[in-house]
């Protein structure tokens, strides 16, 4: 049995965070009661919120003692994940990961990552993929949405970093404590390309990471816009320059 920390970055999620926390805590309370995990926590990291996300989290804390909250003044998914990892490492969790606040990854599918990592003796992390064989996305995506990313963004990542993941950006990743302790001091990206930086540091540190197919639910209200996509391309180049000599 392992203790698990689930970091949930949240930016203006007042309308969705309550349902996400209810679903995750209800599911993991049952897994704890059944003896499948030793304990867990949901660590919500607010980043630059200008709505009532904090109040929504506080309401759920009245029902679930396993919810923790950090409130950061600055916005940025990468910043939220990094600070969440640091906070989780200050306690005794053995497995630490993150999921998106919109519950695109439902709790049973994040738990599948935990089961995979528990029995993967050589792996120090496991990352979900929407594009591997046997993965499923609901509703199905238009082909152009997938191929636009594959032909431009993913090719750039592969050329610069030598990595060959099917899905860099999926918002469900899980690591052993010892891996994160090695990774976190090198994380610098505050925004969307944080996933690539995280995986590239793993590669430079020669950490074994498994990619596994997942079930993903596209939710309305995505925070990732086309303009962010162009910024991500620039960020990938900066990540390569910064970490290419890391050992």
Image (cartoon, helix red, strand yellow):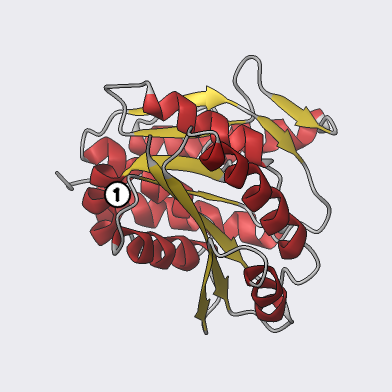
Residue position for label 1? 180
Residue at figure coordinates x 64%, y 34% from the top left: 108
Nearer the observer, 244 or 102: 102
184 to the left or right of 39? left
Most foreground residue, 106 or 4: 4
Where is residue 59 drawn, in percent x and y? 71, 74
> In the current view of this chain or complex, which residue is farthest to the left?
247
Visible residue check, residue 164? no
Residue at the far top in the pictured view: 133
SS at mark 1?
helix
Visible residue check, residue 120: yes
Residue drawn at (43%, 64%), measured in percent from left and top? 84
Which residue does the image show at 14% across and 43% down from the upper left? 247
Up/down of 105 relative to 181, above or below: above
- Foreground residue, 178 or 168? 178
Q: Nearer the viewer, residue 45 or 1?
A: 1
Q: Quadrant of the N terminus?
A: top left
Q: Position of residue 165 (x, y in %)?
A: 47, 28
- Specify few, some or many for label 1: CA neighbours under 10 Å numbering under 14, 14-19, or 20 or more: many
Write down the quadrant of residue 123 in the picture: top left
Percent coordinates x, y for residue 125 in the rendering: 37, 35
Q: Position of residue 218 (x, y in %)?
A: 78, 42
Look at 67% across and 66% down and name the residue there.
63
Q: Residue 163, located in which quarter of the rendered image?
A: top left
């Amino acid at each position: 049995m392992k203790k698990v920390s689930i970091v949930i970055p949240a930016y203006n999620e007042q309308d969705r965070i309550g349902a996400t926390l209810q679903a995750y805590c209800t599911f993991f309370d049952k897994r704890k009661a059944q003896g499948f995990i030793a304990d867990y926590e949901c660590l919500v990291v607010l980043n630059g919120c200008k709505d009532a996300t904090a109040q929504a989290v506080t309401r759920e804390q009245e029902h679930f003692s396993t919810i923790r909250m950090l409130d950061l003044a600055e916005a940025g998914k990468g910043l939220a994940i990094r600070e969440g990892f640091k906070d989780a490492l200050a306690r005794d969790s053995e497995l630490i990961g993150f999921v998106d606040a919109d519950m695109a990854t439902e709790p049973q599918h994040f738990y599948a990552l935990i089961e995979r990592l528990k029995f993967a003796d050589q792996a120090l992390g496991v990352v979900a993929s929407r594009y591997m064989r046997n993965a499923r996305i609901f509703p199905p995506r238009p082909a152009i949405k997938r191929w636009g990313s594959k032909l431009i963004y993913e090719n750039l990542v592969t050329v610069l970093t030598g990595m060959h993941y099917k899905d860099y950006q999926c918002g469900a990743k899980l690591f052993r404590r010892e891996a994160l302790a090695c990774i976190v001091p090198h994380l610098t990206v505050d925004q969307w390309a944080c996933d690539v930086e995280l995986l590239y540091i793993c590669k430079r540190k020669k950490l074994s990471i498994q990619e596994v197919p997942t079930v993903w639910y596209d939710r309305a209200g995505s925070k990732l816009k086309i303009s962010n996509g162009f910024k991500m391309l620039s960020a990938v180049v900066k990540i390569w320059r910064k970490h290419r000599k890391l050992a």
